[in-house]
């Protein structure tokens, strides 16, 4: 653990100007909230100034309109605003208008704030009794939107309505009805549904995120290593619930978040365990994710509880993990920029069967959300492809959570089948190379 914390301190000092080696605090591995906000604000500026114009021009959209109300925010909301903005505040309508390569994309916030100068915030010109500008609200806000659109005269106005894609379906029915009424027949006829705007914007990373994400992986691996050790587990006494709640508490104590409850599962020689007490000879599996600086992780590792006199796991279990590693290798080789998720799935499963592996592929994008925007490469119950969500192509500068399993008969267990379920983050680099963000598990965690 100490070795990894020292490595983490080095990465923090090397990659973040907001945190120095002298300031590194193991209790706050990503710095204070204020330091994190500086980093996240820089990411937001880069996404709005670089990724957003690229996405709009790729999909031939002149204007993107994103209305939302407080506590009913669009899924893309948190990727558009500063870390200090926690809700849409009454109603905010974000308008992005492409003025061309020379002038760039105009960014307007009708209601809401400028997000640290990244938007032009437009409010009512009439002052309230206390002298402050009125917040736009109600019909006046929609009238202003219609005027803004008429003045700019876009040909294609995109909104977030989609049947198949959750990340591109953030425009509520009530907001859409009011928007449509305000725009009138002429402007409404220019409205298009282009789900790839929200999907691609959310899927695309910026290069400066990668070092921080690598540090997050170090924290994840350290917590799993501790959880799968005698520091936490006493065979015959500790339950899977004990380990789950230790992991959850550890995350909370570090000042970071979770997006799902961790899980610990047992596979036991002889069949299903009768209780959740961890015993010697058990194979353990964890599914664990954290959230920090607005980014999510998703990791699954495998462990073995040594029997008395054992110094390593049985060869059959070691071979089973190696089989899972083989499927990981195949996956990374088949993920290619421009290829749809369903195409990757078909290629991976064909090679998997040719290699004599019995597995399942259910890899997903990750980033702003745990189950992130972008192409699905299978679902555990959809090995024939995922219509719509699996038809989206792989992009450079995106991340995947490589979730999969391979089932292998174990000779030492009388041929009983054991599933090795693994999940590790991989990045598609700007040049299209696919590589691990940190590293993958190639040896079972051993509990003595």
Image (cartoon, rainbow, N blue to C red):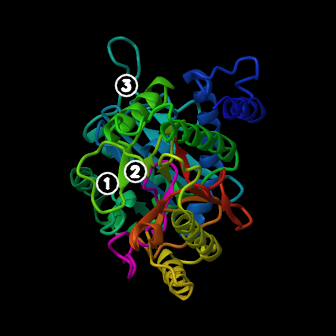
Disc number placed over residue 341 in the picture, else none: none
Instruction: List the residue tagged with mark 2.
Output: 66
Residue 362, placed above or below residue 291? below
Residue 251 on image: x %, y %: 46, 31
Would you name the residue on which mark 3 appears?
A: 126
N-terminal of the two: label 3 or label 2?
2
Count all numbered tags in the image, as a single digit. 3
- The secondary element bearing badge 1 is classed as loop
Extent of the magenta region: 362-388
Specify which label sits upstream in the sequence, 1 or 3. 3
Cα gap from disc 2 to disc 1, whole angstroms? 7 Å
Question: Residue drawn at (67%, 30%), measured in percent from left and top?
Answer: 5
- Find out whether residue 378 is within the magenta segment: yes
Q: CA distance from mark 3 to mark 2?
A: 25 Å
Whether the magenta-drawn stretch holds residue 442 is answered as: no
Marks 2 and 1, the one that precedes in the sequence: 2
Extreme-top residue of the structure: 130
Quadrant of the image for the N terminus? top right
Which corner quadrant of the image does residue 441 belong to?
bottom right
Residue position marked by numbered label 1 in the rendering: 171
Label 2, secondary structure: give it: strand
């Amino acid at each position: 653990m100490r070795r990894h914390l020292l490595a983490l301190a080095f990465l923090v000092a090397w990659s973040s100007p907001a945190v120095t080696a002298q300031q590194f605090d193991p209790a706050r591995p990503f710095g204070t909230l204020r330091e994190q906000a500086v980093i996240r604000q820089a990411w937001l500026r880069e996404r709005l100034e670089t990724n957003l114009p690229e996405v709009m021009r790729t999909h031939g959209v002149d204007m993107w309109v994103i209305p939302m109300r407080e506590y009913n925010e669009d899924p893309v909301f948190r990727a558009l605003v500063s870390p200090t903005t926690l809700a849409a505040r009454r109603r905010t309508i974000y308008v992005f208008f492409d003025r061309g390569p020379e002038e760039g994309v105009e960014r307007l916030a009708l209601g809401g704030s400028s997000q640290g100068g990244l938007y032009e915030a437009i409010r009512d010109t009439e002052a309230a009794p206390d002298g402050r500008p009125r917040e736009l609200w109600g019909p006046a806000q929609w009238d202003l939107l219609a005027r803004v659109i008429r003045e700019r005269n876009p040909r294609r106005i995109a909104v977030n309505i989609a049947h198949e894609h959750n990340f591109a379906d953030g425009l509520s029915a009530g907001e859409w009805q009011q928007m449509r009424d305000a725009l009138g027949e002429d402007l409404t006829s220019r409205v298009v549904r282009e789900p790839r705007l929200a999907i691609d914007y959310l899927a695309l990373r910026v290069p400066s995120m990668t070092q921080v994400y690598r540090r997050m992986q170090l924290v994840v691996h350290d917590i799993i290593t501790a959880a799968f050790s005698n520091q936490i587990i006493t065979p015959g006494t500790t339950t899977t619930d004990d380990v789950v709640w230790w992991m959850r508490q550890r995350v909370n104590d570090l000042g970071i978040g979770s997006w799902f409850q961790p899980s610990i599962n047992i596979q036991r020689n002889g069949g299903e365990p009768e209780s959740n007490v961890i015993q010697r000879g058990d194979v353990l599996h964890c599914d664990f994710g954290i959230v920090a600086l607005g980014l999510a992780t998703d990791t699954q590792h495998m462990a073995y509880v040594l029997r008395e006199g054992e110094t390593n796991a049985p060869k059959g279990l070691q071979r089973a993990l190696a089989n899972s590693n083989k499927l990981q290798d195949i996956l990374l080789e088949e993920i290619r920029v421009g290829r749809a998720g369903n195409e990757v799935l078909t290629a991976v499963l064909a090679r998997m069967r040719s290699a004599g592996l019995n597995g399942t592929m259910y890899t997903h994008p990750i980033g702003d959300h745990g189950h992130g925007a972008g192409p699905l490469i299978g679902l555990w119950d959809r090995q024939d492809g995922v219509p719509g969500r699996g038809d989206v192509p792989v992009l450079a500068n995106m991340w995947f959570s490589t979730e999969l399993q391979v089932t292998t008969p174990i000779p030492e267990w009388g041929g009983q089948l054991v599933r090795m379920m693994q999940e590790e983050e991989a990045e598609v680099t700007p040049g299209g190379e696919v590589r691990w963000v940190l590293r993958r598990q190639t040896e079972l965690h051993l509990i003595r």
